[in-house]
């Protein structure tokens, strides 16, 4: 049987007892406000509201107040501004890569304060923990996590003479398939072979190719970048060549939101996008589609992505205790499984995948396991001190290369110089 969006929400409700029931907190309850980003389509806010209601029904001495603060950048800005003004949240889901900046600004506290906390944190996939592990402490709890996967149109594959059950495994195959999938009506392209978004998370998409080329974009301590290294140059050149040489990718920049829309409308045979879009694509695709790991050059690879829960210093001792209690509840195996089923994000702990709900879902939709299986090849998402500034530098230069106003080498050299200057105060 297939799972529609309604089925997914029903599954989530079954796995999360009494989610829809309204939470009633006592007058003397501890209030925990948390900011939550809404960056991907789907009924995310309703799911989060139901989670809060379910927790409060079981814990009437704690009042949860989710606040939807826009995309990840908006949420970070609002959380930091409110906290510095003395009116910030106790918790927030922010990008896993925001950890260095939050620590540098002395805004958050670590979670591994007790033996019980450490045991709980050991239950998550190590790949999702790496961005939050800094200086021997755990600063972020994995929740809304993802990797990049390739979605492909099986009907388009068959039409192009490709095996619908054999997606490209290498860069060479990927380019060849993209050429074969591209359809033209005279001078007009009616279907592009591949679309890779160049807005929103440009560096993230590039980092996947860098990992596949056997390289890294920066040091593990967040103080240095290697934007002009051979592997990064190879990755960006490959991306540019899909458009300029292979003529199988739209010229210029594909918007983050356009790629899944083009895929669903049959205008793209393959796209690279977050697994967080899995539920959206599954619910709306009118054709058989596949989900595949990203192709390899030297190796397979994808950066992890998405958001962690962070706890702010402004939380009182009672609010910190209540926050940790909620996080242990919401990341339990059953709820982690239900969250993954309902949203498409990767359930962040191995025992979530052994729950009956997840087993039933995978039997119906095996493709949901691709992102989990790709964790074997995952690398932590690129992250530095002053991360927002560094990301702006590299994204601007990547977009210049994609638009053709700079060569890949010139763009990466310029990014290296600018980023090195910003990070100089952090080099020890």
Image: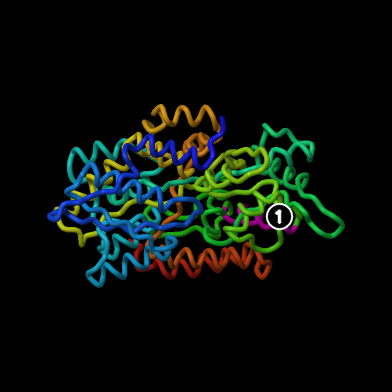
Query: Where is the C terminus found, in terms of image quarters?
Result: bottom left
Question: Is residue 246 visible in this depiction of the protein?
Answer: no
- 145 horizontally vs 399: left or right: left
Front in this rendered view, residue 261 or 380? 261
Taking the magenta stretch, the answer to whether it contains residue 396 is no
Which residue reaches farthest bottom?
Answer: 85
Q: Position of residue 101 (x, y in %)?
A: 34, 62
- 10 horizontally vs 265: left or right: left
Residue at image coords 49%, 37%: 7
335 vs 260: above or below: above
Front in this rendered view, residue 401 or 346? 346
50 vs 388: above or below: above
Residue at image coords 77%, 54%: 190
The secondary structure that dominates the magenta segment is helix
Residue 255: name its quadrant. bottom right
* Circle 1 residue: 249
Q: Position of residue 286 (x, y in %)?
A: 66, 43
Query: Where is the N terminus found, in terms of image quarters?
Result: top right
Label 1: how many Cα within 10 Å (few below 14, some 14–19, many 20+): many
Front in this rendered view, residue 26 or 16? 26
Q: Position of residue 2 (x, y in %)?
A: 56, 33
Residue at image coords 71%, 52%: 267
| Magenta stretch bounds | 232-244
Q: Position of residue 65 (x, y in %)?
A: 28, 57
- 115 horizontally vs 389: left or right: left
Which residue reaches farthest right?
Answer: 186
Taking the magenta stretch, the answer to whether it contains residue 239 is yes
349 vs 327: above or below: above
171 vs 237: above or below: above
**Circle 1 — which element?**
loop
Question: Is residue 75 visible in this depiction of the protein?
Answer: yes
Front in this rendered view, residue 246 or 21? 21
């Amino acid at each position: 049987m297939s799972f529609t969006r309604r089925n997914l929400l029903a599954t989530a409700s079954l796995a999360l007892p009494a989610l829809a029931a309204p939470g009633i907190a006592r007058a003397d309850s501890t209030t925990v406000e948390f900011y939550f980003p809404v960056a991907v389509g789907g009924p995310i806010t309703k799911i989060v509201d139901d989670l809060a209601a379910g927790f409060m029904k079981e814990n009437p001495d704690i009042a949860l107040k989710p606040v939807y603060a826009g995309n990840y950048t908006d949420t970070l800005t609002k959380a930091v501004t409110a906290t510095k003004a003395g009116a910030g949240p106790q918790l927030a889901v922010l990008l896993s890569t925001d950890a260095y900046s939050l620590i540098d600004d002395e805004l958050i506290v670590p979670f591994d304060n007790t033996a019980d906390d450490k045991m709980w944190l050991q239950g998550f996939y190590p790949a999702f923990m790496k961005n939050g592990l800094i200086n021997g402490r755990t600063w972020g709890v994995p929740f809304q996590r993802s990797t990049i996967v390739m979605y492909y149109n099986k009907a388009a594959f068959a039409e192009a003479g490709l095996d619908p059950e054999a997606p490209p495994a290498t860069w060479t195959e990927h380019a060849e398939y993209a050429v074969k999938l591209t359809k033209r009506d005279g001078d007009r392209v009616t279907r592009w072979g591949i679309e890779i978004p160049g807005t929103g998370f440009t560096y993230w998409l590039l980092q996947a190719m860098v990992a596949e080329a056997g390289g890294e974009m920066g040091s593990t301590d967040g103080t240095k970048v290697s934007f002009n290294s051979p592997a990064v140059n190879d990755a960006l050149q490959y991306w540019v060549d899909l458009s300029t040489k292979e003529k199988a990718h739209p010229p210029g920049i594909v918007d983050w939101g356009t790629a899944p829309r083009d895929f669903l409308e049959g205008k793209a045979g393959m796209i690279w996008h977050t697994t967080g879009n899995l539920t959206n694509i599954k619910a709306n695709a009118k054709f058989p589609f596949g989900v595949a790991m990203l192709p390899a050059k030297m190796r397979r690879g994808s950066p992890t992505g998405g958001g962690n829960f962070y706890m702010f210093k402004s939380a009182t001792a009672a609010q910190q205790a209540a926050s940790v209690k909620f996080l242990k509840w919401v990341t339990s195996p059953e709820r982690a499984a239900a969250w993954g089923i309902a949203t498409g994000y990767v359930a962040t702990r191995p025992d979530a995948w052994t729950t009956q709900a997840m087993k039933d879902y995978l039997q119906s939709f095996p493709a949901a396991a691709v992102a989990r299986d790709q964790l074997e090849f995952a690398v932590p998402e690129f992250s530095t001190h002053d991360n927002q500034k560094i990301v702006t530098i590299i994204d601007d230069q990547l977009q210049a290369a994609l638009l053709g106003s700079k060569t890949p080498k010139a763009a990466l050299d310029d990014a290296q110089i600018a980023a090195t200057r910003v990070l100089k105060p952090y080099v020890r």
